Amino acid sequence: MSDFNLDSMSLAELKQLHKDIAKAISTFEDRNKAEARAQVEALAKEFGFSLAELIGTNKTTRRTYVAPKYQHPENSSVTWSGRGRKPQWFNQALASGKTPEDLAIHAG
């Protein structure tokens, strides 16, 4: 490691040194993680696997399609599956006296 004579450095040099040290500290853990990951990936490859296969991150989750259950009373292209938060139009229709059965899409 270099020897620094801090007493002989200017304020600008000391501030730059401070910035460089702060950056080295903040990236130290990231560098160690990257090195560890590379070593683990190499080891997994030796056994014929990818790291993703071993830790199970290559699984894709698919959302299943849910058919709409309710439709807007005036605009039938606006629908709601009945899952999640109630849309504003649904709440307004209920407030105006309609029932969920009134808004239901009937298979025909």
Image: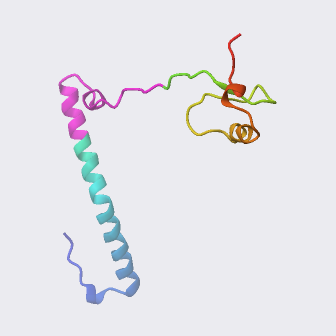
Q: How many marks?
A: 0
79 relative position to 51: left or right: right
Q: Name the residue rendered at 26%, 85% in the picture.
A: 6
Examine the structure image and report whether residue 31 is included in the region drawn in magenta.
Answer: no
Q: Name the residue rendered at 66%, 39% in the picture.
A: 87
Residue 22 drawn above or below residue 103: below
Q: Name the residue rendered at 22%, 22% in the picture.
A: 48
Position of residue 8 measured from the top left corner of the image (x, y, whole percent): 29, 88
Position of residue 34 measured from the top left corner of the image (x, y, whole percent): 28, 46
Kindly give the residue lying farthest to the front in the view shown. 97
Q: Quadrant of residue 82?
A: top right
* Of 85 and 4, the residue lying toward us: 85
Residue 52 drawn above or below residue 6: above
* Of 44 and 98, the residue lying toward us: 98
Colour theme: rainbow
Kindly give the residue lying farthest to the top in the view shown. 108
* Of 90 and 78, the residue lying toward us: 90
Location of the N terminus by quadrant is bottom left
Examine the structure image and report whether residue 49 is included in the region drawn in magenta.
Answer: yes
Location of the C terminus by quadrant is top right
Position of residue 66 measured from the top left corner of the image (x, y, whole percent): 56, 23
Residue 40 drawn above or below residue 18: above
Kindly give the residue lying farthest to the right in the view shown. 74
User: Which stretch appears magenta?
Assistant: 38-62
Residue 16 drawn above or below residue 80: below
* Of 65 and 4, the residue lying toward us: 65
Position of residue 27 measured from the top left corner of the image (x, y, whole percent): 32, 59
77 relative position to 46: left or right: right
